[in-house]
Image (cartoon, grey):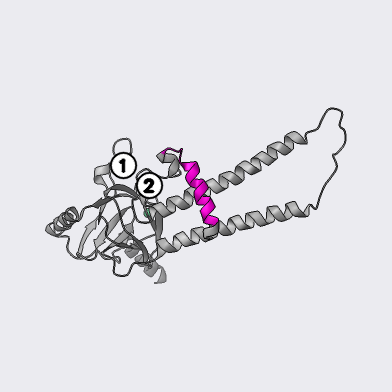
Amino acid sequence: MKWVAAPVVLSAALLLAGCTPEQQRGFLPEGSEGATNHTDGVTGLWVTSWIVLLAVGILTWGLIIWATIAYRRRKGQTGLPVQLRYNMPIETFFTVVPVILVLGFFAFTAQEQNKIEARIDNPDNTVEVIGKRWAWDFNYVDEDVYFQGVQVQTDAEGNAEEDTMPVLYLPVDQTTEIRLETRDVIHSFWVVEFLYKKDMIPGQTNYMSFTPTKTGTFMGKCAELCGEYHSMMLFEVRVVEQDEYDAYIESLRDAGNTGQVSVEFNPNQERLANDNDNAKSQND
Ligand SMILES: [Cu+2]
């Protein structure tokens, strides 16, 4: 792997030396640099892939343009040109090179994904995030307090009002495990600047493991179409210093939010009851 990586990284470094910060992160969201311990790896994979693919593209477009100009029909030419086929060296070349490229992309992606998917033993901080149509609940597992979100409010133009968003607090530089749950349909937990998203599937627990490495406010949203107000299923992540985090946890405790919100609680109780009644009366 290193034999392939070294020249690619070197040429990427040379190419990127003259780029703006936005270009250097391959136009990924602002604020993603160093947001978690994984974001630099993801950005590296993305930007390197871009450079390799752009090189292939330039070579291919160049050859196409060269061929159309060099072998164009000249004045006085009639009929078909000489028909060529079975050029073994070229056919071998354009089979082997793409296979190497695809295997390379696969290997680097798998390597990065294994790093991100690895679960942490004894994380410093564990939060259970429950998706629901169309908001979020957060169980702070270690502190035994919870926050229940309601759907974001909109202004007259239908834009989300930022101060009504559910907020997830995370302490900076702590190894963090997020347990992903849902109590209705499939949702997807996506913190945009963290450059990773994962589905929340009924009856299954998914995990996200990372360390938030810089303080700040980050944008979160549901990334799995989940019904009418899917686009309003927004939240905010505030990565804060430990004392600010402790103060927030204390405020939840003072508000009486002790214990944990159950995953079982289904917001469609009434409808489920009706469905059951209907089924019963049909059976009778
Ligand atoms: Cu959703």
The residue beneath circle 1 is 160
Query: In this rendering, does residue 139 appear at all?
Result: yes
Q: Position of residue 217 (x, y in %)?
A: 28, 47
Number of marks drawn: 2
Q: Position of residue 78 (x, y in %)?
A: 87, 33
The residue lying furthest to the bottom in this view is 284
Please tell me in which quadrant of the rendered image residue 59 appears: top right
Secondary structure mostly seen in the magenta stretch = helix
Q: Tag 1 or tag 2, which sits nearer the N-term?
A: 1
19 falls in the magenta region? yes
Callout 2: 10 Å neighbours few (<14), some, many (20+)?
some
Residue 198 or residue 222, whichever sits in front = 198
Callout 1: 10 Å neighbours few (<14), some, many (20+)?
some
Name which residue lies at 50% across and 51% down. 9
Please tell me in which quadrant of the rendered image residue 154 appears: top left
Mark 2–mark 1 distance (CA, rounded to whole Å): 10 Å
Name which residue lies at 33% across and 58% down. 131
Q: Is residue 62 left or right of residue 197?
A: right
Residue 90 or residue 200, whichever sits in front = 90
**Magenta segment range?**
4-20
Q: Look at the numbered disc 2 and say if its residue's Cβ is closer than 8 Å to ligand 1.
A: no
12 falls in the magenta region? yes
Q: Is residue 177 above or below residue 160?
A: below
Question: Which residue type carries mark 1?
Answer: Ala
Residue 191 or residue 132, whichever sits in front = 191
Q: Position of residue 233 (x, y in %)?
A: 34, 50
Name the quarter showing ligand 1.
Answer: bottom left
The residue beneath circle 2 is 231
The residue lying furthest to the top in this view is 75
